[in-house]
Image (spheres, grey):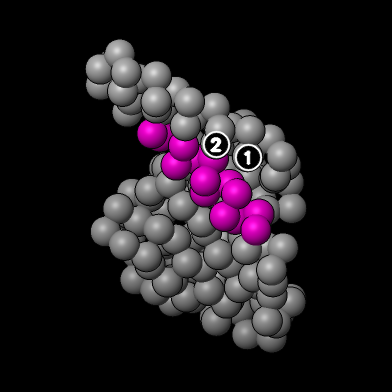
Amino acid sequence: MADDKNVLTVNIVTPDGLVYDHHAKMVVVRSTDGDLGIMANHEPIVAPLQIGEVRIQRIDKPGHEDRVAVNGGFMEMNGNTASIIADSAERARDIDLTRAQAARERAQRRIDAAKQKNDADELKRAQVALQRAVNRINVKNSKLNQ
């Protein structure tokens, strides 16, 4: 690598194992306080994450961004390593758009049913499922348009 002091290592880990591990110029995550852009030599930070897209500008592919759908968790930046510990994560290239769209439709039906039954707990679970499905669809579609 040209200058290791300006290189960030980004890794994303879920309970199922390592999902992503590359060198990058920058990573953008959606924290509970808003979007964070992190570059090499950033001060140490720990941030809780929302359901959202993680964008990684890789060193080895200028002008290219990897995209990963992340469903909650947290990010720790320390020593030029951004470690994302997520409940679940899926790279854009691995997302099955048809399955994600079907999940969105199921979640919407669950929301409608929960509203009819006035079931607040089921409504919250269905809304989270909808957010996850929409996030996966958005990550896949943004990758297709890149």
Identify the element where label 2 is drawn: helix
- The residue that mark 1 highlights is 101
Residue 49 image point, x, y percent = 38, 50
Residue 39 image point, x, y percent = 47, 75
* Magenta part of the chain: 127-141
Q: Which quarter of the picture shows residue 97?
A: top right
For label 1, the crowd category at 10 Å Cα-Cα, with few meaning under 14, some 14 to 19 and many 20 or more, is: some
| Relative to 82, 128 lies left or right | left
Q: Relative to 64, is 51 above or below?
A: above
Q: Main secondary structure of the magenta part?
A: helix
Q: Which quarter of the picture shows residue 127?
A: top left
Choose between 69 and 131: the one closer to the eye. 131
- Asked whether residue 75 is in view, the answer is yes
Q: Quadrant of the C terminus?
A: bottom right
Residue 80 image point, x, y percent = 49, 68
Q: Relative to 46, is 57 above or below?
A: below
- Asked whether residue 11 is in view, the answer is no
Residue 105 image point, x, y percent = 56, 33
What is the spatial separation of the Cα atoms under label 1 and label 2, in whole angstroms?
5 Å
Instruction: Identify which residue is drawn at 39% across, 25% down.
Output: 112
Cβ–Cβ below 8 Å for labels 1 and 2?
A: yes
Q: Is residue 65 magenta?
A: no
In this rendering, the count of numbered labels is: 2
Check disc 1 and give the amino acid type.
Gln
Check disc 2 and give the amino acid type.
Arg
Identify the element where label 1 is drawn: helix
| Relative to 134, 142 lies left or right | right
| Relative to 47, 11 lies left or right | right
Residue lying furthest bottom in this view? 2
**Label ID, residue 104:** 2
